[in-house]
Amino acid sequence: MKDYTYPNLSDVAVSTVMQALSDEGRLSIVRQIMRTPGGECACGEFCGGLSKATVSHHMRVLRLAGLLQHRTEGTRSLTSLRTEEIEKRFPGLLNLIAADPHAPEVEPC
């Protein structure tokens, strides 16, 4: 499995996070993770009609913005949000994303 690196969230500018969240596909991925029981999704479980390459690109952008983390379980790579760290650095951001009344419904993983 790939060994990922993650930025320290204290070094991530709000503009970097907002740019990462400016794409509807990336917002959809974040919402899907938030709505999944246990808060983790395997890479192959992302819905929304996006190609595998597009999902990989979006995951990379979100990871480099400090929003995602990955852990390996056997042959699967599980993705989750860095919820506690995000809430500490950007209080209320995840609640705002979850509460967006204009957000399309996202299929669960």
Image (cartoon, rainbow, N blue to C red):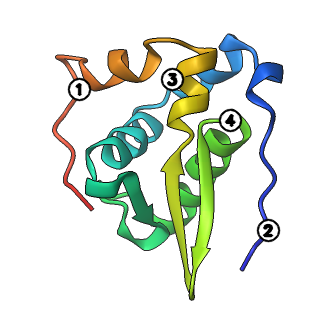
Check if mark 3's residue and mark 2's residue have beta carbons within 8 Å: no
- Is residue 32 shown above or below 100? below
Badge 4 crowding class, 10 Å Cα cut-off, few under 14, some 14 to 19, many 20 or more, is many
Residue annotated with mark 2: 3
Secondary element at image label 1:
loop
In this view of the protein, which residue sits in the foreground, 22 or 91?
91
Residue annotated with mark 1: 103
Instruction: Give me the residue at 51% from left, 12% from top.
Output: 91
Amino acid type indicated by mark 2: Asp
Q: Quadrant of residue 100?
A: top left
Give the Cα separation between the discs numbered 1 and 2: 32 Å
Secondary element at image label 3:
loop
Give the Cα separation between the discs numbered 3 and 2: 26 Å
Instruction: Give me the residue at 83% from left, 22% from top.
Output: 11
N-term-proximal mark, 1 vs 2: 2
Quadrant of the drawing holding the N terminus: bottom right
Q: Position of residue 48 (x, y in %)?
A: 29, 54
Instruction: Give me the residue at 70% from left, 21% from top.
Output: 16
N-term-proximal mark, 4 vs 1: 4
Residue annotated with mark 3: 22
Viewer-nearest of labels 1 and 2? Answer: 2
Instruction: Give the left or right position of residue 70, taking residue 26 as reference.
Output: right
Residue annotated with mark 4: 66
N-term-proximal mark, 3 vs 1: 3
Instruction: Give the left or right position of residue 7, taking residue 42 as reference.
Output: right
Amino acid type indicated by mark 3: Ser
Viewer-nearest of labels 3 and 2? Answer: 2
Badge 1 crowding class, 10 Å Cα cut-off, few under 14, some 14 to 19, many 20 or more, is few
